Every structure is written in C-alpha cells, then in structure tokens.
Image: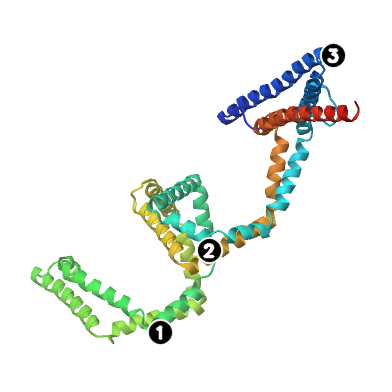
Amino acid sequence: MSRTPTAALSPADQKRRRGLQVMKGVALGGLVFMAVLFVIAFALQEQYPPLAYVRAFAEGGMVGALADWFAVTALFRHPLGIPIPHTAIIPSRKDEIGQTLGEFVETEFLRGDVVRTKLEETAIAANLGEWLSDSEHAERVGAEASLLAAAVLGALSDDDVNDLIEDLAREHLISPDWGLPLGGWLGRIVESGAHHGAVDLGIDSIATWLAANHASFSGLVSHRLPAWVPSIASRLVDDTVYNEAVKFVAAVQADPRHPARIAIDGYLDRLAENLQHDPVTMARLEETKETLFDSPRVRELAAEAWNTAKAGLLDSLADPQSGLRRRIAQAVGEIGTRLTTDAALQRRVDGWVTDAAVFLVDRYRHDIASIITDTIERWDAAETTEKIELMVGRDLQYIRLNGTVVGALAGLAIYTIAHALLP
C-alpha cells in the first residue's frame, strides 16, 4: 500500500509552491508576450517590411518557450494530459529513480576509503571531549542517560527479573557442588592462619557481651538446684559460673596458643578435610544449601531486594540533584576533559571510531542504501512528483524563460542570416 512522503505541506513547501506559481506565471507571460508580438508583426510585415525581423524574433521565442514547456512538463506529468511516450518520467519511473539513487549513494559515498578519509580528517575525540567538558552538556548527557536507564528499568518485568535471578542462582550457586571448593578454600585459610582475626573478633564480642550482661547469669544454674539450698548459695553458684566464664574468655584472649584456640583450629581443619573427602559431610552441605535456597522466605528476600534496588535507582535517576545524577555528570565531564587533553587517548578513540565506521559501512552499506530505495518505493507517485516539483520546479521555470529568450534570439539570427545570404 502506497503512502505519501508527508501528510501535509510544510510551511517551507507552501513557500516553495508560491514561488513556483509566480515563476510559472512569468514563464507563461513570456510565451504570451511572444505570441502577441508575433501576431502584430505577422499582420503588419507586408506594410512594414522590417517587422519581418520582429516576426522571426517572436516566432523563435514561441518555439523555444513551447519546447522548454514541453520538456519541463514531461518530467512531472503528461503534457495536456496526452500519454505521449517518454513523458511523466518521474511518476512512471519513480522506483527506478530510487534504485539508481540508492546505488549511487552506495557506490560513491558508502565506501570504506571515503569514510576513512573523511573521519581521519576530523578530530572526533577532541571535538567530543570539548563538548562533553562543558558542564551544561555533561548534565544534559547525564539526564538523557538517566531517562534511558529509567525507561529500561521501567520496561523490565519484575517477575521476569526474579525468574532470571533464580535461574542464575540455580545455575551458578545451587547446581555446582560446594563441598570441594569450599573445603579447599577453608583449608587454605586455616593453613595460613587468616581465620585468627575472625576468632579474635568472636572472642572479643563474647567478652564484651559478658561484661554488659552480668544479670543474665542470675538463675542460669541456681534454678536447677534443690529448693532447700539457701538463696545465698544459689547466688554464689551463679556468680561463680559468670566469673569462670569471664576468666575463661580472658584467658583465651590473652593466650594465642590457648587449648580453645587450638581446638577451633583443629575443628576447622577437620571440617575442611571432610568437605573435600567425606561423602556424608558433603551430602549434608548440599542438602543444607538446597534447603536454604529453596526456602520461600529466601525467594521473598530476593524479590524484595530487587524491588528496593529498582525503586531506589528510579528515584535517584529522576532527581537531578541526586548523588547518582551528579556523579554521572561529573564522570561525563571528566571523560570530556581527558579526551581534550590526552593526545594518546584521542588517537585511540579516533582509531576506534574510524575502524568501527568503516567496518559498518563495508558490511552494511547495501542495507543502509536500501533505506533510500525502499522508502521511495513506498511513496505515492503523485505525491512524490509534487514534492520533487516543489523542490526544483521554480528553477525549471527559469529554463522555460531562458528558452523563450534564446529561441527568440536564435530565430532572429537565423532569419537575418538567411535574408542576407538568400535575398
């Protein structure tokens, strides 16, 4: 189904149409003037013989005007509506013209050597860097990038994202066995002593808790004693347990070779060995892992984490004063400054852009040129003809006017020469 190039004439086309109509009137006026002059000269030439020259002048002008009118009109339509062969060239050969134009653009403009020469003459990186280093431009780029990112986030389906997260977690976390790599990792930590800092942190935390929670030991042991035991003895038992716990933790803190520390080292070493070689331990780890990740609560937490992150990103992207937007603009400005001052970076960027453009042109130039051909093929013939006539028709009317003048001068010259040679 055909379509028109434009739904309605633009203001520029309306101006062109007025200019075309004026020039058509001028060209037609020249033809009418020559016709009137011819009639007068033809009628009076026997009475006034010199008017024969005027008649020849006007006759040549009419012939030139009519010939050029026919030539100009034949480009766009059939003259006087008569389907003369090789007229209405543009509407009848619209598709061929489009194909020829597309082939011309493809062979003459979309060539790798042409594109490379042009781009190598252009300081792409320097010009881009100068533009980006301007704070207003950097903020504009940041705003456009934020709008694009927000549109992408808004288009994402939460269910699809959750399914993707679950699939990635299942592929990279649940499906692989954890025992062997986790055991090897833990073994290297124990061998290097890197876990001692974590042990110290745990012991210090226990010591801090004991110092702040003496009251928590009240009745911890004494409530299990017989009822006949005096209350003072019960309190003494609770205080003894608390003091022993404090002393034990203090001793572990003070002695790097305390038996408790050695026991922890031994347990971690055995755990690392079992994770790598004990089928029972490895199976229990895999079972625990699957139970953890298959828990509905874990899935809910993952969904909540995504929704929270998405909402936070959207709010930051929408707020021009947010830290994220300011950092984007700052980063863009810094990139622009580097592109402006770093000659080596300029050469690399220019080379990347040039090579990428040449690759795209060499690979897709036919597809790019086909845009012209396909677009013109979809245009309606009548509307296309009108559009082209508005673009070049005013200049073509000058051809008609020039043809009138040239024809008149040629007619006069021919008559004069013939009269001189053949009296």
Q: Residue at x 52, y 52 (%)?
A: 163
Helix, strand or loop for disc 1: helix
Helix, strand or loop for disc 2: helix
Helix, strand or loop for disc 3: loop
Q: Are marks 1 and 3 in contact (CB under 8 Å)?
A: no
Q: What is the number of callouts on the image?
A: 3
Q: Considering depth in this image, is 352 or 298 the residue closer to the camera?
A: 352
Res. 19 image quadrant = top right
What quarter of the picture does the N terminus occupy?
Answer: top right
Q: Residue furthest bottom?
A: 257
* Position in image of residue 203 (x %, y %): 26, 75
Three-letter amino acid code at the position of disc 3: Glu
Q: Which residue is mark 3?
A: 46
Q: Nearer the viewer, mark 1 or mark 3?
A: 3
Q: Nearer the viewer, mark 2 or mark 1?
A: 2
* Position in image of residue 20 (x %, y %): 65, 27
Q: Is residue 32 above or below residue 189?
A: above
Please report whichever mark, 2 or 1, sits nearer to the chain's N-terminal start: 1
How is the model colour-coded?
A: rainbow
- Relative placement, left or right, of 203 versus 230 is right
Q: Is residue 400 above or below residue 142?
A: above
Res. 192 image quadrant = bottom left
Q: Nearer the viewer, mark 3 or mark 2?
A: 3
Please report whichever mark, 3 or 2, sits nearer to the chain's N-terminal start: 3
Q: Which residue is mark 2?
A: 349
* Position in image of residue 8 (x %, y %): 60, 27
Q: Which residue is mark 1?
A: 191
Question: Is disc 3 surrounded by few (<14), some (14 to 19) or many (20+) residues within 10 Å?
Answer: few
> Rounded to the nearest whole Å, what is the CA distance between mark 2 and mark 1?
48 Å
> Rounded to the nearest whole Å, what is the CA distance between mark 1 and mark 3?
130 Å
